Image: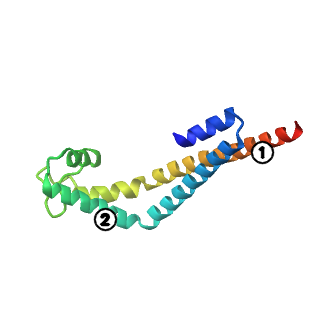
Amino acid sequence: MLVGFFGCCGAVRESQCLLGSFFACLLIIFGAEVAAGVFGFLNKDKIIQDVQKFYTKTYKENSNSTMILSYQKVLNCCGTKSIPCDAGSETKDCETGIKEFFDSKLFIIGYVGIGIAGVMIIGMIFSMVLCCAIRNSREVI
């Protein structure tokens, strides 16, 4: 919300300072997004293991919690490898379901990240173009 405020007010008031702040904020967010994307891609297996461990720990504490039931519904799974449930032999365990979900949906997450990064780059370009246009129009006056 603060970043949007910088961009809108900078454009309306023709303020180079606010537009520069908008650009700097977008640049920082863009850098953080790229760093998180690289980190997530390089540590995909560790992230999957952490989610599986979290699921297993929560399942052992309370197998009927809302979160566990949500996992089971979304992933179409039941139980864990060490604690199978009685849903039938065709139902996979949720640890396998989590791994399959991450493996099959990772490219979608990447495409969404690339799309958001593209919008941010366009925002940075427009803010600098507007900032330069404001500077040039003030030099003429």
26 w.r.t. 56: above or below? above
Q: Distance between the residues labelled 2 and 1?
A: 49 Å
Query: Which residue is at a point 58% across and 50% down the rendered structure image?
Result: 25
Residue at image mark 1: 132
Q: In this view, does 139 lie to the left or right of 54?
A: right
Picture coordinates of residue 1 (x, y %)? 51, 39
Q: Is residue 68 left or right of residue 139?
A: left
Say which of 9 and 34 sits in front. 9
Residue at image mark 2: 49
Looking at numbered disc 2 in the image, what kind of residue is underneath it?
A: Gln
123 w.r.t. 95: above or below? above
Q: Across the whole image, how many numbered discs are drawn on residues? A: 2
Query: Which residue is at a point 28% across and 55% down the rendered structure image?
Result: 97
42 w.r.t. 9: above or below? below
In the rendered image, the quadrant that contains the C terminus is: top right
Mark 2 or mark 1: whose residue is earlier in sequence:
2
Query: Which residue is at a point 36% across and 67% down the rendered structure image?
Result: 46
Q: In this view, does 123 lie to the left or right of 49?
A: right
